[in-house]
Image (cartoon, grey):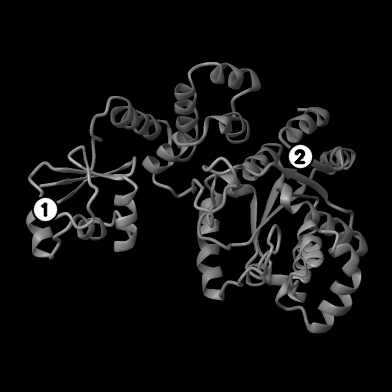
Amino acid sequence: MDISKQVEVLKKNVVDLITEEDLKAKLEKAKAEGRPLRVKLGADPSAPDLHLGHLVVLRKLRQFQEFGHRIVFIIGDFTACIGDPTGRNKTRPPLTEEEVKMNAQTYQEQVFKVLDPELVEIRFNSEWNAPLSARDVILDLASRYTVAKLLERDDFNMRYKSGIPIYVHELLYPLFQAYDSVAIQADIELGGTDQVFNLLVGRDLQQSHGQEPQVVMTLPLLVGLDGEKKMSKSLGNYVAFNDPPKDMFGKLMSIPDNLMPSYFNLLTDYSEEEIKRILSGHPRDAKLKLAWSITSFFYGEEEATHQQEEFLRVFSRRELPEYMDAYEIETLYNEGVKTITDLLVFIGAASSRSEAKRLIAGGGVQLNDTRIDDPMAPLQLTPGSVLRVGKRKFFKFV
């Protein structure tokens, strides 16, 4: 594929491209020199799971790989201990080193569900940031950027004008992230639209170190399952790479209809014409196609088809799922399970008695198709009884 066509492919779904001319020039130069471009993505391991919001950018990285380029995936074990202030109206609590290490391990495993490991270089930014002395930070890093420019960031600017404290370590965060680009000599850096300021600092810092500035490419932030805010583990509106296939399929079937166009566009390989055709039909059928496509990407077509059949069995034909966790009634009584609240906590359907009571009060608990309203209702189970919690959790008793 010639360079102009590559640029068109790589531009799809991109919000900010700084600059298209630079991207084309870098692709042409790499081809002439017979070397791959170094395409950077950084991620702070602030939570153990990657989710579909990360998939948007990872799919773009996969396109670069298909054109023969090398991905440098930077795990921000150093910057995670500072805490990214992007989009925050208050200081983010720093993670412990142990939390960062545990999360970083899962990131390495999950990223290869999307990227070809043969064309990925995994780096930790503690390699170059941790050895920096106070002198290095002050004279070589901080001296290359002004407070005025840092305060141009929307979140910093808002906090400054509102009198909300901004701590010095937060001001340094964009510089440490930008220094990653200098350390690995990035040709291109990708990120979400909320990262554009940090990525541009990377360009500036590279230039001040005598390097050719990286191309900046940002992609849309995926809206979460709530249909309102960006997908985030902290908001609970996410689908994780490691979600079991049943949960993944069920969560995707729960998204608001208005999210389907962006999910199809950002998370699948369907063409614009195919997406238009799919969305012209019944919303449920379109959602089934979406859930099947994404579940099959992570778990294969056979598993996705099985989950689709299970979903239709339970939610369309109102049948019971083929598989349910089973518990012996005698064991429950021997363990002192006396009420429906006891039962929900014992089988793990609720994490606490207070959560169990909230589920019951919200009408989310049914025993043998009968809604439970009394959290202290005595347990009355017979062999074959089925408990339903929420829309997707079923338990049977023998």
Q: Residues within 10 Å of mark 1 (few under 14, many from 20)?
A: few
Residue 46 visible in the snapshot = yes
Q: Earlier in the sequence, mark 2 or mark 1?
A: 2
Residue 142's quadrant in the figure? bottom right
- Residue 15 circle label: 2
Instruction: Please tell me which residue is depicted at 69% across the width and 71% down the height of the picture.
Output: 127
Instruction: Please tell me which residue is depicted at 89% across the width and 59% down the height of the picture.
Output: 204
Quadrant containing the N terminus in the rendered view: top right
| Front residue (pair 70, 329) | 329
**Residue positioned most to the bottom:** 134
Above or below: residue 226 compared with residue 212 = above
Circle 2: element type: loop
Amino acid type of the residue tagged 1 in the rendering: Glu
Task: List x then y, in percent, for residue 334.
Answer: 8, 64
Residue picked out by circle 1: 328
| Front residue (pair 322, 194) | 194
**Side of 103 relative to 85 (left or right):** left
Instruction: Please tell me which residue is depicted at 31% across the width and 45% down the height of the picture.
Output: 364
Task: List x then y, in percent, for residue 121.
Answer: 65, 56
**Side of 133 relative to 319 (left or right):** right
Above or below: residue 307 compared with residue 271 = below
Above or below: residue 79 compared with residue 359 = below
Marks 2 and 1 sit apart, C-alpha to C-alpha, by 55 Å
Residue 145 visible in the snapshot = no
Circle 1: element type: loop
**Side of 140 relative to 338 (left or right):** right
Amino acid type of the residue tagged 2 in the rendering: Val
